[in-house]
Image (cartoon, helix red, strand yellow):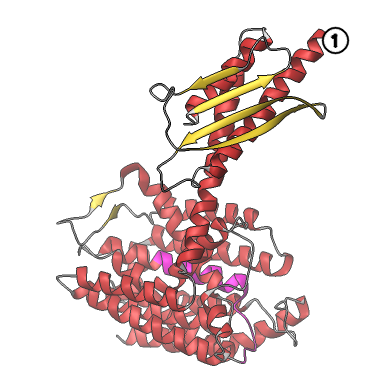
Amino acid sequence: MRTYLAAFIISLMASLILVPVVKRMAFRLKAFGQGEALPIPRLGGVAVYFSFLLPLIGLFFYENGVSVLFWNEAKLCLGIFLGGTFILLLGVWDDLKNLSPWRKLMIEFLIASFVYACGFKIGHISSPSLEKAFSLGIFSFPVTLLWIVGLMNAVNLIDGIDGLACGISLFVVVTLGSIAFMTGQSLTILLCVALAGSLLGFIRYNFNPAQIYLGDSGSLLLGYLLSIFSIWGSNKASTMVAFLTPMVALGLPIIDMVVSMSRRYFSGVPIFKGDREHIHHRLKGMGFSQRKVVLLLYGFCILLNGLALFLYVSNNPHLILVFIALCSLLGLKYLGYLKPHVFKDRIEEFGKIRKERFYRYILRELVKGLKTPALEERVWHLTREFSEKADFDYARLEMENLSKSIEWSRSGLEGTLHPYTQIILPLLVDLKVIGKIELRKVHAPLDPSQKDHALFLGADLLTREIAKVVEASFAQVK
């Protein structure tokens, strides 16, 4: 216990001393936060990391029961510290040079792969519904990489307001340390205690009004360390909810990341494009001051971490997970993320995009399979096969140079009077109308408009493809 207390005090004091030093260094390097009235230095991760390392380095020169564990777990410790150093350097590079998102992501995956090779693996997934955890097998590698890289970017995303990422990381590391204490993981306790002291010292300068920011060097580092601690703790523990617990504890950054990426994806915006639609931005937009926003999110994080601990010791975690899910959904609805009409619009837009890709795929494959040189047969093949594969019920093509119009209808619908929706589009070649295409789709009597977009899109793509075939045929004749 004295070792843990000493590690906490040393990292706390080191953080309080190092932050002003790093602050002056950041000013000299002109590493400032963007969009601020007054320049606020970044690179806070440098102070956090070195104050975290200081008490751990001291144990190499002071032998006791805890320090022996470093040598017993030398490979894992090497993975933690080398991986952390690489992440810190990546973050500093990004703070100074502003790396492209894709380059940064690629390097993050490389570092996560190195850490995996050092022994940090998610080899199984626990579930409250199962008697025991099930093995991931070959999927261990991608799942581990997604967990590490995902948490790094989740913490990075919530680092948009003074003290938020630092405070939430502090609560989470206390929870992970508590779980390690309950399961007798001495080395994990030491790492969590050292990081907690470092964060507590840093938040003195990072809370509103902030004197220094974590920067990417700090937010990526914290996400990395939390992911590593959670993997180590869940692998050492035997309870079936060992891995669910850190997921709940890290709920706020995970929820914010998932909501942000989903929102951008369904809106057609690049998922790495920054915006001001995160949870903390929504709360500020509701009129809360920056301090109140941070305190509200601190409260939610404390609730999640308390539930995570209760989940860990509970014999029946199902109700806890349901309660967490309901609270999260209500919170997202309150913040305006779950608007039914917006969600419906996004789903419809996504469906239209998928439908267009499907139609283009059909036409691409049909054109590849065209073997006959005769224009009439090529056009007939395209019209009939596309209409059938695209799930239309009737197609008619009238075009110059054809002996007669081409007409097709789905088997069983010939001569019937089913209600239908139709679209007729002109066939243009060199800006001259040389024919027209008509497509129909049978619908339910009370549902006449659901197929309009699909009909128009199908007819438009088909006319364009037939026009290309006709132009190519005319070019060969010339």
Label 1 sits on a secondary structure element that is: loop
Magenta-drawn stretch contains 213: yes
Q: Which residue is mark 1?
A: 478
Q: Along the line of sight, which residue is nearer the eye, 234 or 300?
A: 300
Quadrant in which the C terminus is drawn: top right
Query: Would residue 369 be counted in the magenta stretch?
Result: no
Residue 453 in the image: x percent, y percent? 56, 44
Q: Nearer the viewer, residue 415 or 425?
A: 415
Residue most toward the right?
Answer: 478
Q: Position of residue 238 (x, y in %)?
A: 20, 63
256 shown above or below 366: below
Q: Position of residue 83 (x, y in %)?
A: 51, 61
The picture places residue 283, in percent across and down from the top left corner, at 53, 83
Amino acid type, label 1: Lys
Comparing 434 with 12, the one in front is 434
Residue sitting nearer the eye, 422 or 339: 422
Our reading of the magenta stretch's main secondary structure is helix
Q: Is residue 268 above or below residue 431?
A: below
The image quadrant where one finds the N terminus is bottom left
Identity of the residue drawn at 38% across and 68% down:
229
* Segment tinted magenta in the rendering: 209-228
